[in-house]
Image (tube, rainbow, N blue to C red):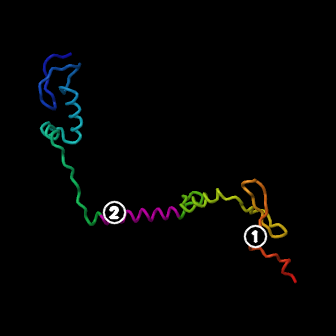
Amino acid sequence: METGNYICHLCEKEYEPTKRGIQKFCSSKCRKKYNYHKNIVPSDKSVATETISKPSKIKVEEMSLAGVGNAATGALLADGLKGIVKAFQPEENKLATKKDIQELKNFKYKRYFLIQNMERRYDGFLPYFDMTTNSLIYLRDPNYINPAANIL
């Protein structure tokens, strides 16, 4: 360990080193303050010690008409690009809407599902799959008109 007194780089007090090598600061508190403020203010010691006691003011830029116009133009351009991207996006990759989610909820609790690839029965009843009994059933179609009944 070196002997002799040193001067702290921050508070400029004279101190005797307690660790190996050359110390720049009298304590870890001074070292931390110095490292914190050296990034904010230039490395001039007089300026650095003043900024420790006085917080620096943040400069707020004024709003200008040109800046507002640029921001509005950028927002409109971004929205337009989103629309173009959505137009060319495949159907299976599109995002679900609230309506789609509501339809899925209703679909989940539906008991009878129409079987699309089966023909009507001879009397016009439609084939359905019953979700509770897991069976095939035929239900009346209210819009069906029997062509054999109209022949007179």
Location of residue 63 in the rendering, given as x and y in whole percent from the top left corner: 25, 62
The span from disc 1 to disc 2 (Cα, nearest Å) is: 58 Å
- The answer to if 70 sits in the magenta stretch is yes
Label 1 belongs to which residue?
A: 141
- The single residue placed furthest to the front in the displayed view is 132
Question: Mark 2: which secondary structure?
Answer: helix
Residue toward you, 5 or 109? 109
- Which amino acid type is shown beneath numbered disc 1? Asp
Q: Which residues are magenta?
A: 68-86
- The single residue placed furthest to the bottom in the displayed view is 152
Q: Is residue 120 left or right of residue 64?
A: right
- Which amino acid type is shown beneath numbered disc 2? Ala
Task: Looking at the image, tell me whether mark 1 or mark 2 is earlier in sequence order.
Answer: 2
Say which quadrant the C terminus sits in: bottom right
Residue toward you, 110 or 78? 110
**Residue in view at x 74 percent, y 63 percent:** 116
Residue 71 is labelled as 2
